[in-house]
Image: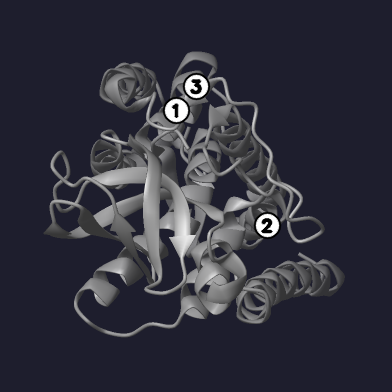
Amino acid sequence: MSAWSDANRRIVLGIAGGALLALMLGSAVYVELVPQEWGAVIADPAAWDGKEVLVSLYTVEAIEGPDRYVLRHGVWTVQVDGPSADLRVGVDLSVRGLFRASDGALVETWRELAPGRQGKRILGLGSIVVLGALWPSLFRRKQGFLVSRA
Amino acid sequence: MPDPLFHLSTALLPGALFGPRHTGAFVLGTLLPDLGSRLPGLALERVVALGVPIPEFVFTPWSVLHVPLGAGLGAVVLAYVFHETERRAAATWLIAGVALHLGLDTLQFHHNGGYPLLYPCSMELYQIGIFGSEATVPWSAPVALVSVIAWAVRVRNLPKPADVPD
């Protein structure tokens, strides 16, 4: 491999890696400046008071009573006023409701359970196991790098 | 998104049936958006659940690996773990896998409106909405089993590693 193509290779890696890093850091800065989803609601509660909010595919973190439960998604927790009889901790669901600024709660008007999410997480781990098991049949090593086996 | 095991099968089964040389890169490409974006998020959620405070901006960067531009750049970077003799082909197949993954995901219906396919140029969400986001779960294990068996049959007919020139 010539020095020219070696330099080219480094340039492509530098550009792609740099652009990816910039995109990742840029997205982190962006959500700090312009909060998204539930982050936007809690950043300016007064502006969202009485407005309809959707929280999509959040997980039940706690049941606080027959008409109150807590959802979590990443760093966000959402207090929801709504029937909790058919819920349990760990269940995933989407909830639409009206935001109440006085206590930061969401008053549920609609919900949809997502019973397949837990199975999906398990299948996600399964994909890593299958990939690991198949790895020797997919790749071999050459001078410290991967080459296709098939 | 269809579950990761289903995504893996969508690359492995065609590889087993039609025998493209770069099935491995294709499989990695189909997993890259989920492994790159969801896995760190799930791990961070576990840490938060333990009571460790993690700011929101730590969660966010990974999600760019689930949009076309970020996943495409990730595929190019990942191609550098391949030997230089097949790096270009690996990048092509990794990107093909990423495109297949994001294409399948876009077929789903999400209440939040879908995926920001043009991020960072636009925050507009896109989806076609043909099936639900958990629709593949019951099918995933059987499809994966068929794919793995088909792949195993194909692998039996490959030349032994010692026969492959280095």
Amino acid on which the number 3 mark rests in the picture: Phe
Q: Quadrant of residue A13?
A: bottom right
Judging depth in this view, the residue of A67 and A133 nearest the camera is A67
As measured in the structure, the alpha-carbon distance from the residue carrying label 1 to the one carrying label 3 is: 22 Å
| Horizontal side of residue B149 vs A104, given as left or right | left
> Residue B102: in sight, yes or no?
yes
Chain for numbered disc 2: B
Kindly report the distance in space between the C-alpha atoms of the residues bearing marks 2 and 3: 30 Å
Task: Please state the horizontal and vertical placement of residue A33, each as a whole percent of the image.
Answer: 67, 81
Q: Which kind of residue does numbered mark 2 sit on?
A: Val
Circle 1: is it few (<14), some (14-19), or many (20+) Cα within 10 Å? many
Q: Residue at x 67, y 57 (%)?
A: B76
Q: Amino acid at mark 1?
A: Leu
Relative vertical location of residue B3 with respect to residue B120 in this rendering, above or below: above
The chain containing the residue under callout 3 comes to B
Residue located beneath label 3 in the image: B131
Residue A91 vs residue A42, the one in the foreground: A42
